[in-house]
């Protein structure tokens, strides 16, 4: 129970290595779920059951990413532009691409929304995964080393 509580804890700070370890484990878990779904489907068994777990498992990165933001002395609300906004912009891009077939003037907004989504996602990755944490204690707790 302590491990699960720590995985879901939004308070405190996390080191870069903690973030990358969690990314590795979640990537392995999601890969196993995908492969299980493929094999079940190949043998005539509905493969949707393992797929129901993909989103909840993938969302387990959020608490550690929020703690990484805390380590950078940023609010966890930064996850919205880093993780949610790119998908919203990609959705807008999909809608614009359908409309751009009839109206070539929409190609620039299509390009802009796609590029904005990419830039926000990349910025989030750099901010959370690569930049050093704030030295010393900050408003989210003592430094983690």
Image (cartoon, rainbow, N blue to C red):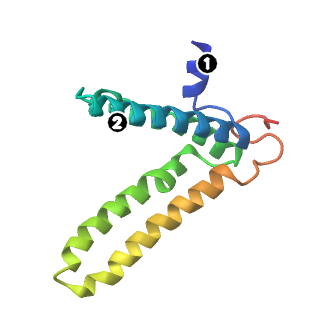
User: Judging from the image, what secondary structure is the residue with disc 2 in?
Assistant: helix
Circles 1 and 2, Cβ within 8 Å, touching? The answer is no
Is the C terminus in the top left, top right, bottom left or bottom right quadrant?
top right
Residue at x 71%, y 43% (from the top left corner): 16
Q: Position of residue 22 (x, y in %)?
A: 61, 35
Q: Secondary structure at mark 1?
A: helix
Residue at the outermost top position? 1
Q: Nearer the viewer, residue 24 or 13?
A: 24
Binning the other alpha carbons within 10 Å of mark 2 as few (below 14), some (14 to 19) or many (20 upward) gives some
Side of 35 relative to 69 (left or right): left
* Residue 81 visible: yes
Q: Which residue ends up furthest to the front in the rendered image?
A: 43
Circle 2 residue: 38
Report the side of 70 relative to 56 (left or right).
right
- Residue at point 63% right, 38% down? 67
Q: Position of residue 94 (x, y in %)?
A: 28, 65
Question: Which image quadrant for residue 37?
Answer: top left
Q: Quadrant of residue 142?
A: top right
Q: Is residue 86 above or below residue 63?
A: below
What number is the disc on residue 123?
none
At label 1, counting other C-alpha atoms closer than 10 Å, the crowd grade (few under 14, some 14-19, many 20 or more) is few
Q: Which residue is mark 1?
A: 3
Distance between the alpha carbons at the discs numbered 1 and 2: 30 Å
- Residue 73 in the image: state x and y as whole percent: 69, 48
Q: Nearer the viewer, residue 4 or 27?
A: 27
């Amino acid at each position: 129970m302590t491990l699960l509580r720590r995985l879901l804890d939004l308070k405190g700070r996390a080191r870069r290595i903690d973030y990358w370890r969690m990314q590795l484990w979640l990537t392995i878990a999601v890969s196993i779920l995908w492969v299980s779904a493929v094999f079940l489907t190949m043998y005539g068994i509905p493969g949707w059951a393992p797929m129901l777990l993909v989103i909840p498992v993938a969302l387990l990165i959020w608490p550690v990413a929020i703690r990484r933001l805390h380590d950078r002395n940023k609010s966890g609300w930064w996850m919205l532009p880093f993780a949610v906004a790119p998908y919203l912009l990609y959705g807008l891009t999909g809608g614009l691409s359908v409309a751009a077939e009839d109206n070539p003037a929409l190609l620039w907004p299509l390009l802009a929304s796609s590029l904005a989504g990419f830039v926000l996602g990349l910025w989030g990755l750099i901010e959370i995964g690569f930049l050093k944490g704030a030295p010393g204690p900050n408003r989210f707790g003592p430094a983690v080393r």
